[in-house]
Amino acid sequence: MPLSRVMGRQQASKPAIIHCSVSRVSGSSAAPQATAGTAIFAVSKELDENRFTLTTADSSRLIGCGCLNAETIWQMATDTFLAHHLDQCEAGKEAVYQITCTSPQDSQLLAHKLHEPVASKHEKKQQNDFASKTDLGSAELYFHYYGMLMHQQNMLQDQIRTGTYYAAILENPTDFQDKVVMDVGAGSGILSLFAAQAGARKVYAIEASGMAKYARQLVAASGFTGAVEIIQSKVEELALDAQVDVLVSEPMGTLLVNERMLETYLYARNRYLKKGGRMFPQVGRIHTAAFSDANLYAEVANKAFFWMQPSFYNIDITCLHKEAAAAYFTQVVVDAIDPSVIVSQCASKTFDFGSITDPELINFTIPLQLQIGRACVVHGIACWFDVLFDGSNTQRWLSTAPGQPTTHWFQLRCLMETPLHVQQGQVITGELRLAAHNRQSYDVFVDLAAPPLHPGQLPQKASGKFDLKEPYYRQLNPQTSAAWPQQEQTAQQAPPQQQQQSYVQQMHADSAQMQQSPNYGWSAQQPGVQQYPMMGHVSQDSRQQSDGHQWNQQAYQNMWQ
């Protein structure tokens, strides 16, 4: 299909041509050289010999990326233009390339981008805070994704997500009335509009993707043009001479930290939040527990059965089976988990966004000491997260736990290629470690150990490395999710006692197994670790300990009976 049809444009009768003097760099660490006003053409050897990126002459801005001699859609954070070909016209170290665009308008746009003024030292420093740790290709795809209305709709339709943010902001007028607010990664601008509804005097809505133009439309249609200002920029490149009273953001990815937007949230805290300012959310927690799910294990293991064919078109491909099977066990599994597969209590890690530093997010470990509630085969660990909106008037928890109404984050499982056989009361030890990489995600390392199968034998061990960027999005369990939609809008807005009863009744209705499953947030008291209430509406006087925590403890104990 022609690119012009894909993009919904009419094909120009005569393509426009841009001539660029460039330096080609192939597998070299040396910085390319070019005169002012020219473009840099760089080949990335680690990705593909035909892969290129085009930047301004000082390499401060990415203009586009694509493949040589192939039709390419050039996507930027603020504009989209089409380039049909990038052809070499003259051989040599300093070569001349011509970029053939689909229209004169695209040609003019590209020419303007190539000749933008060189960034100042201050601008370069701001850009490097994001660019120095982020792969350019990953960033382009990221902002392209969030610039599309269909993906914003996916998040807006998550009633637990949107409804909890709405309640957390509107129920805390003390924090928003006549205050200056910054919305970090505003997207459609929905949180900015919530802040305006709560009485904010000024809201700076910062959005780097092309979604900014739609956010402006929503703000204008909602009548908040005077209060909400949409600024299209990365937060790290923002030139704003202002301090704010409140930060609002939805920086959570899968397993809380995926996409690494939490680091941008902290950058905004350090740069723009007044001392003593409020953050919505204030606290995030990652929870993990052992799970037993033979069906999931068989499903993933059987994916590699294809490679067991000794005569695939007269070719024996069985030599690749072992590597293929191992590869499938490097994918984290993202789906809605039946709570009955959870077989231990939780290990948790708390992040206080008001005080945590970047290094604490870039590489961290969760020690595991998981006591098993019943004899079973442990197939790995399940993970989920929750966040706290610690308002002056009221608190709200947003949970992605098993058994709670499903969110667009679902839950996550690290499936071990080597299962562990355990008895009731035994303890699995080990650790879950996450290490950030430049593709805006994390490598996940899991090490588990269990008692030996028989006396005198060595302990059982299982290890795995997973890429959080490459998940297996599994089909949702219809039985688990079907009962939830009618509750989703109100479940996490209910007071603790009412909410506990609601979920107990639902677990009875779903299955006897779910009735006895552990609630998501139970963990033993640990010295020096504050125990936060588990979910829902928490009153001002229940912050140290809540009935919700006691109820969750009882739910866990029921599993042992």
Image (cartoon, rainbow, N blue to C red):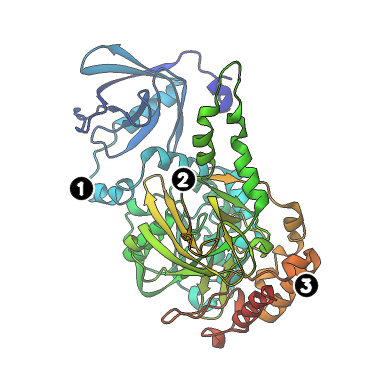
- Label of residue 505 in the image: 3
From where the camera sits, is residue 195 visible? yes
Q: Nearer the viewer, mark 3 or mark 1?
A: 3
> Can you say whether 230 is above or below 398 in the image?
above
Disc on the earlier residue, 2 or 3: 2
Q: Nearer the viewer, mark 2 or mark 3?
A: 3
Mark 2 lies on a secondary structure that is: loop
From where the camera sits, is residue 416 visible? no
- In-front residue for pair 560/540: 560
At 44% from the left and 53% from the top, the residue drawn is 444
Q: Position of residue 468 (x, y in %)?
A: 48, 49
Residue under label 2, please give it.
209
Q: Compute the Cα span from label 3 to label 1.
A: 61 Å
What kind of residue is marked 2?
Ser
For the view shown, which residue lies furthest in the bottom direction?
Answer: 541
Disc on the earlier residue, 3 or 1: 1
> Can you say whether 368 is above or below 185 in the image?
below
Q: Compute the Cα span from label 2 to label 1.
A: 24 Å
At 46% from the left and 39% from the top, the residue drawn is 141
Residue under label 1, please give it.
121
Mark 3 lies on a secondary structure that is: helix
